[in-house]
Amino acid sequence: MTPTRAGLIALACLVASLTGLPAGAVAASNEGTADEGFAVRINDRLVDRAITSAFVMPDEAIRVAARDLPPSARVSLEAGAAGLSARRTGDNTWRIEAPSAPGVYPIVLNRSDDATDRRLNLFVMQRFDPHTATLDGYRIGHYELEPLRGREIYEPPQALMPVTKDGLDTHLSPHFTIGQFLCHAQPGHWPKYVRVKPMLVAKLEAIVAELQRRGIKAQTLTVMSGYRTPAYNKAIGNTTTYSRHLYGGAADIYVDTNGDGRMDDLNGDGTVDVDDADWLADLIAGLAKVHPDFAGGLSAYSANSAHGPFVHTDVRGVAARW
Ligand SMILES: [Ca+2]
Ligand SMILES: [Ca+2]
């Protein structure tokens, strides 16, 4: 069942009252945060952000609708890229057919009665046969063909998103670009291939929003490790073959507003250490508590010779802290 908008607002207000947040600080969308303007429904996702993204198969059709508008408001949809077909199917709703060719297809929804718009970057993925280990010379490695405990989120991907060098800065959301999530394997090879779960991006956006609410001027998070190919995950010594990183559902992150390439002193005690990662992990745990779709793995890591303190966060659907 899809929750109603009114129900979500009521939930958000309840959450706000429980957490002491002002009601406006908690979004009514099902992705945790909101920008001024209107909401966009993409199939079953309701997104309240100025920029959002969707990953689709070649030729896949999706439903897009502008929501939460006064009855008089009219929204126009611009989808200029060749091969993309958008057909209006009702009041402020469209059926969009993705092209066959993988790539990024920007879509803009413009509201007629004010200046607000919504940008939707449609990422058309490239089909991938999980029985093969490479894609265009990029080593993917082997996914487990049997999903863990039969869960859909552990099914091997049927498609991956190609990313070219000039596409690194394409936004997934207001504060994150697809380039931040690339695997570190084969640095000189292009295109690379990536998976990123929209719910992970939504969770990271919610973390940024909560940091800002607490007065930390984060414009993004540093993603030390986002997507990992199974080949890379194995090469760096991981024996877990169902790591959420392989499915685009995990990120190892830190906050770096002073740009020194390491975690900031988040708890303000004058040093940067695992306590700052713990501080960030506690913030994330608080978000997941009030927003069940963010449930996932969570762990704070100390610095070592290779990296500073960081936090692993993922969206596996069940809470697990270690
Ligand atoms: Ca820093
Ligand atoms: Ca500190």
Image: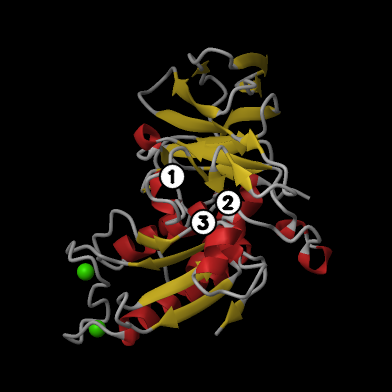
**Callout 1 crowding tier (Cα within 10 Å): few <14, some 14–19, many ≥20:** many
**Where's residue 276, x and y in %?**
31, 81
Judge the density around disc 3: few (<14), some (14-19), many (≥20) Cα neighbours within 10 Å. Answer: many
> Does label 2 or label 1 sit earlier along the sequence?
1
Question: As shown in the figure, which amino acid type bears the numbered disc 3?
Answer: Tyr
Cβ–Cβ under 8 Å for marks 3 and 1? no
Q: Secondary structure at mark 1?
A: helix
User: Relative to 274, is 51 above or below?
Assistant: above
| Residue beneath the point at 58% across and 14% down | 83
Mark 2 is on which residue type? Lys
Q: Position of residue 15 (x, y in %)?
A: 54, 67
Q: Write down the residue under mark 1.
A: 178
Q: How is the image coloured?
A: secondary structure
Camera-nearest residue between 46 and 121: 121
Indicate the quadrant of ligand 2 in the picture.
bottom left
The answer to whether 315 appears left or right of 63 in the picture is left
Identify whether 154 is placed above or below 182.
below
**Residue type (three-letter) at the residue carrying disc 1:** Ile
In which quadrant will I find the C terminus? bottom right
Circle 3: element type: loop
